[in-house]
Image (tube, rainbow, N blue to C red):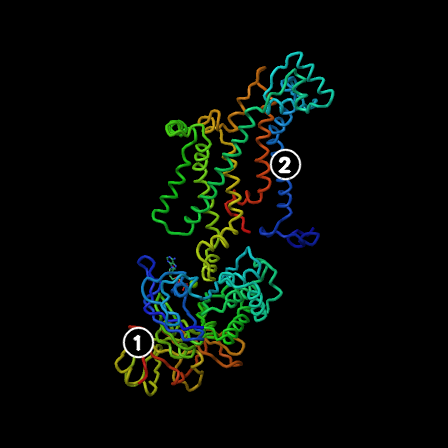
C-alpha cells in the first residue's frame, strides 16, 4: 500500500492553507461567532423586554407570580406616568361616564375613569423630561463645540505646557462622581447654582469636556496635516482651512463625540440626584421615586424608563456607523 | 512666473540643523531639482519657500520682493505634495476649483480655467469622481491640475512621483517636464532619486546633512562632482573611488597597480601625497594592454551592457562597463584602462575634488 507522502491526497487541493487567506476553518468560526453574538444579544435584551411588557401591564399583572408573558395590555402605566389624577366623587363619575358614552373623553381620561379617577393635569415627570432634554442637549452642544476647538488646538499647535494641560484635563475625570458630589453640592449652594438649569448645564459640560477634548484630538490627529497645508498654499487662512477642510473631514468624529456626551448627560444620575430638587430635576432620579398612593407603580416606572430609553436608541441607531469609529478610535480607516 | 532667491536661509529644530545657511538663486522658468538622501533637509527647504515652515534666519525673495514672513496664502506659490493631499471630501472638480475660489473668481471664469487645465492634463473624464477612487497616476494629475489652475508664480513639488510604480513614474516624469517647458514655469522639484534628478533638472542642487554639496547642471554634477559625496551619490553605481598615492608622475593604486598621471593634473596634485582616484564605470575600458589589473569578482547582465565587478586587491572592488556580448568568467584576470579625460582626483582629507590646472 502506497503512503500519503508518495501519492498525495486523492482529490486535487483547491483550498489555501495560507494564513492570510480566509480558510474554511475561519469561515466556520465566523458562523459560530455570529450565533454567539445573537445569543448574547438576546440575553442582554431580556431586562429590556421585561421592562417593555411591564409598562403595559395592569397593577395586578405586574405583581403576578410567576410573571405573565401573555396578558391583556393596558395604558394604565402611561397614564400614571404622565398625569396627575384625583379621585372623582360618585356624582362627578356619573357625569364623566356620560361624556365617555358620547365619545367626548380621550383614551387616557377613560383609563383614569376606569379606576374612578379624573385627570387634573400633567405630572411632574413631563417637566423633568423637558429638563433632561434641555440640560443634556445644551451641555452636549457646548462640550462638543469647546471640545472641537480645544482638540484641534491640542492636535495641531505647540502650546506651552501642552502635555501637562492634556493630563490635567483628563485628571478631572479620574475621581468618581460620588466623590466630588458633596463638595460640589456645597459650592453650588453657595453660589446659587443648586437646582438650576445653568448649574446642571455647566456641570455636565465640564464633566464631558475632558472626554470631548481627548476624543476630538484623537480624530484630528488622524487627519493628515497635508490637507490643511495644501489649503494654506491654495490661498486660505487658518480659520477658513479649518472650516472648509478640517471640519468636513471630522464629521464622523464629531458625531461620535456628540453621542458619547449626550448619552452621559442624558443618563447621569448621581449629580442630578444631589444637585437638583424641583426646578431643574432631570428624569433619571425621578423615575425610581415614582411611588404612587397604592404602593410602587411598577408599570409607571417601566413606562418612564422605556420612554427615557427611546431618544438614546434613536440617536445611537442613527449614528451607529460613527459610534463604532469612535469606539475603535479610528482603528478602522475609511 | 518668477525668480526665487534664498539668502543665507537656515532652519534649526531645537539645536539640530535641518538646513544650514543656504544661498540659491533660481532664475525665471528654471526647473531646479533638490536632490539628496532622506533627512538631508530638502522638504524643509521647500516648505520654507512656500511659507509652511518659518525660517530660523535668512531671507527669501520672490521676484526681488522679500516674502520671508509672508503667510503661505499670500505668496502665490503652488505646492504639490508627495501623497497628493487631494481633499477627500470634495470631487475632483471642486478640488481643482478650490484655489480659484480662494481668489474669489467668478463661476464662469472658474469653469473656463478648469476646462483648460483638464484638457491640458487629459483628465476631463475624472471631474465627477472622488479622489479616493482614482489611481495613483490620476491622483497625481489632479494634484498637478490643482497647482496649475491658478497660474502661480512658482511650483514646488515634494517627491511628487515617489508613490508611483516605476513605469508610471517614467511617464509622469516626462509629462511634468513637458508641462513645465510649455508653461515656462519656475519649478523647485524635490527628489531622492538621482535618476529622476538627472532626467528632469535644468540644474541639480545636491544636498546632504543639511548642507548644499553642489549646485550645477546634470552634466556638471555627473562628470565634475564637487566632492566625494556627490561622486558617490550620482550615478548607479556611483563613481569608482580608489585610494592611491602619488609619486614620480604616477599614482600607485592597490594591487601593485600604477596609473600614469594624465597631463594637466600634475601641478595640482604634486602637493598631495595621498589622493583618491575617481572614474565612472563607462570611463574604464577592458583592454588586454591596459595598465591596471584586477580579477573579475562578479558580472551582471544589464541588457545593453554588462557590469563587471573587478577586484583590484586590498578589498577594492571597482565597477567597469563591458560591451554587450563580451564574457569574462568569474575569477578571470583582466586588464583595463581609464580614459584620461574622464579621471577625477579627490583630496582624501577634506573630500573635495581637485581642480585641473
Ligand atoms: N517639524 C520638525 N521638527 C523637528 N525636526 C524636523 C521637523 N521637520 C524635519 N525635521 C528634521 O529635519 C531634518 C530634515 O528633514 P526633511 O527636510 O524632511 O528632509 P528630507 O525632505 O530631505 O528627507 C530631518 O532630520 C528631520 O528629522
Ligand atoms: Mg522629504
Pick the front one: B247 or A55: A55
Q: Where is residue B63, by image quadrant?
A: bottom left
Dot 2 beta carbon under 8 Å from ligand 1: no
Q: Position of residue A281 (x, y in %)?
A: 49, 27
The residue tagged 2 is A38
Is residue B236 at all visible to an observer of this figure?
no
Residue at 42% x, 65% y is B75
Residue at 41% x, 84% y is B337
Is residue A274 at all visible to an observer of this figure?
yes
The residue tagged 1 is B347
- Residue contact between numbered discs 1 and 2, judged by CB atoms under 8 Å: no
Is the residue marked by circle 1 packed among few (<14), some (14-19), or many (20+) residues within 10 Å?
some
Chain of residue at mark 1: B
Whether callout 1 and callout 2 share a subunit is answered no
Residue at 57% x, 35% y is A312
Q: Where is residue A186, by image quadrant?
A: top left
Q: Quadrant of ligand 2?
A: bottom left
Secondary structure of the residue carrying numbered label 2: helix
In this rendering, the label closer to the viewer, 1 or 2: 2
Q: Position of residue B275 (x, y in %)?
A: 31, 77
Residue at 62% x, 49% y is A22
Q: Is residue A27 left or right of residue A222?
A: right
Q: Is residue B315 left or right of residue B300?
A: left
Secondary structure of the residue carrying numbered label 1: loop
Q: Position of residue B143 (x, y in %)?
A: 52, 64
Q: Is residue B127 left or right of residue B13?
A: right
Pick the front one: A129 or A260: A129
Q: Where is residue A96, by image quadrant?
A: top right
Chain of residue at mark 2: A
Pick the front one: A313 or A89: A89
Pick the front one: B225 or B324: B225
Amino acid at each position: 500500500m502506497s503512503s500519503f507522502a508518495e501519492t498525495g491526497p486523492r482529490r486535487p487541493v483547491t483550498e489555501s492553507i495560507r494564513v492570510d487567506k480566509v480558510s474554511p476553518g475561519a469561515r466556520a468560526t465566523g458562523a459560530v461567532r455570529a450565533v454567539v453574538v445573537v445569543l448574547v444579544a438576546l440575553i442582554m435584551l431580556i431586562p429590556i423586554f421585561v421592562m417593555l411588557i411591564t409598562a403595559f401591564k395592569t397593577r395586578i399583572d405586574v405583581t403576578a407570580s410567576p410573571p405573565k408573558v401573555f396578558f391583556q395590555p393596558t395604558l394604565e402605566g402611561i397614564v400614571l406616568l404622565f398625569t396627575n389624577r384625583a379621585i372623582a366623587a360618585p356624582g362627578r363619575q356619573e357625569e364623566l361616564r356620560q361624556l365617555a358614552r358620547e365619545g367626548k373623553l380621550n383614551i387616557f381620561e377613560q383609563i383614569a375613569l376606569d379606576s374612578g379617577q379624573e385627570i387634573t393635569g400633567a405630572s411632574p415627570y413631563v417637566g423633568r423630561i423637558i429638563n433632561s432634554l434641555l440640560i443634556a442637549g445644551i451641555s452636549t452642544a457646548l462640550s462638543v463645540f469647546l471640545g472641537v476647538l480645544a482638540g484641534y488646538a491640542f492636535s495641531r499647535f505647540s502650546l506651552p505646557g501642552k502635555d501637562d494641560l492634556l493630563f490635567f484635563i483628563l485628571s478631572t475625570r479620574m475621581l468618581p462622581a460620588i466623590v466630588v458630589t458633596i463638595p460640589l453640592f456645597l459650592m453650588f449652594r453657595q453660589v446659587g447654582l443648586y437646582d438650576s438649569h445653568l448649574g446642571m448645564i455647566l456641570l455636565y459640560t465640564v464633566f464631558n469636556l475632558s472626554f470631548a477634548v481627548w476624543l476630538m484630538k484623537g480624530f484630528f490627529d488622524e487627519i493628515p496635516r497635508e490637507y490643511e497645508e495644501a489649503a494654506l498654499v491654495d490661498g486660505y487662512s487658518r480659520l477658513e482651512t479649518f472650516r472648509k477642510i478640517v471640519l468636513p473631514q471630522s464629521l464622523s468624529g464629531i458625531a461620535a463625540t456628540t453621542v458619547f456626551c449626550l448619552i452621559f448627560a442624558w443618563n447621569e444620575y448621581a449629580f442630578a440626584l444631589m444637585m437638583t430638587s424641583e426646578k431643574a430635576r432631570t428624569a433619571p432620579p425621578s423615575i425610581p421615586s415614582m411611588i404612587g398612593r397604592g404602593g410602587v407603580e411598577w408599570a409607571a416606572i417601566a413606562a418612564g424608563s422605556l420612554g427615557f430609553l427611546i431618544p438614546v436608541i434613536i440617536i445611537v441607531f442613527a449614528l451607529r456607523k460613527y459610534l463604532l469609529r469612535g469606539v475603535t478610535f479610528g482603528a478602522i480607516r475609511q | 512666473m518668477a525668480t526665487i532667491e534664498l539668502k543665507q536661509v537656515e532652519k534649526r529644530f531645537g539645536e539640530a540643523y535641518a538646513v544650514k545657511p543656504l544661498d540659491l538663486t533660481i532664475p525665471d522658468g528654471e526647473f531646479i531639482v533638490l536632490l539628496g538622501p532622506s533627512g538631508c533637509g530638502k522638504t524643509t527647504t521647500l516648505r520654507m519657500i512656500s511659507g509652511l515652515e518659518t525660517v530660523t534666519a535668512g531671507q527669501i525673495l520672490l521676484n526681488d520682493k522679500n516674502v520671508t514672513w509672508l503667510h503661505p496664502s499670500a505668496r502665490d506659490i503652488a505646492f504639490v505634495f508627495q501623497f497628493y493631499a487631494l481633499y477627500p471630501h470634495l470631487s475632483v472638480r471642486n478640488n481643482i476649483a478650490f484655489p480659484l475660489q480662494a481668489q474669489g473668481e467668478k463661476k464662469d471664469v472658474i469653469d473656463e480655467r478648469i476646462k483648460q487645465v483638464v484638457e491640458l492634463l487629459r483628465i476631463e473624464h475624472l471631474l465627477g469622481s472622488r479622489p479616493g477612487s482614482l489611481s495613483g497616476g490620476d491622483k497625481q494629475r489632479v494634484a498637478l491640475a490643482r497647482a496649475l489652475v491658478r497660474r502661480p508664480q512658482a511650483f514646488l513639488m515634494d517627491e511628487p512621483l515617489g508613490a508611483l510604480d516605476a513605469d508610471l513614474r517614467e511617464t509622469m516624469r516626462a509629462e511634468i517636464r513637458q508641462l513645465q517647458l510649455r508653461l515656462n514655469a519656475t519649478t523647485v522639484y524635490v527628489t531622492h532619486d538621482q535618476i529622476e534628478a538627472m532626467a528632469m533638472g535644468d540644474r541639480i542642487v545636491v544636498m546632504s546633512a543639511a548642507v548644499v554639496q553642489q549646485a550645477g547642471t546634470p552634466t556638471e554634477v555627473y562628470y565634475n562632482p564637487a566632492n566625494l559625496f556627490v561622486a558617490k551619490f550620482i550615478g548607479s553605481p556611483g563613481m569608482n573611488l580608489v585610494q592611491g598615492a602619488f609619486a614620480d608622475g604616477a599614482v600607485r593604486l592597490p594591487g601593485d597597480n600604477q596609473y600614469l598621471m594624465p597631463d594637466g593634473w600634475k601641478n595640482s596634485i604634486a602637493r598631495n601625497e595621498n589622493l583618491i582616484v575617481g572614474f565612472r564605470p563607462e570611463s574604464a575600458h577592458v583592454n588586454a594592454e591596459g595598465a591596471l589589473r584586477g580579477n573579475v569578482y562578479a558580472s551582471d547582465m544589464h541588457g545593453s551592457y554588462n557590469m563587471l565587478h573587478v577586484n583590484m586587491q586590498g578589498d577594492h572592488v571597482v565597477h567597469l562597463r563591458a560591451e554587450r556580448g563580451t564574457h569574462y568568467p568569474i575569477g578571470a584576470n583582466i586588464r583595463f584602462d581609464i580614459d584620461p579625460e574622464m579621471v577625477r582626483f579627490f583630496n582624501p582629507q577634506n573630500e573635495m575634488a581637485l581642480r585641473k590646472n
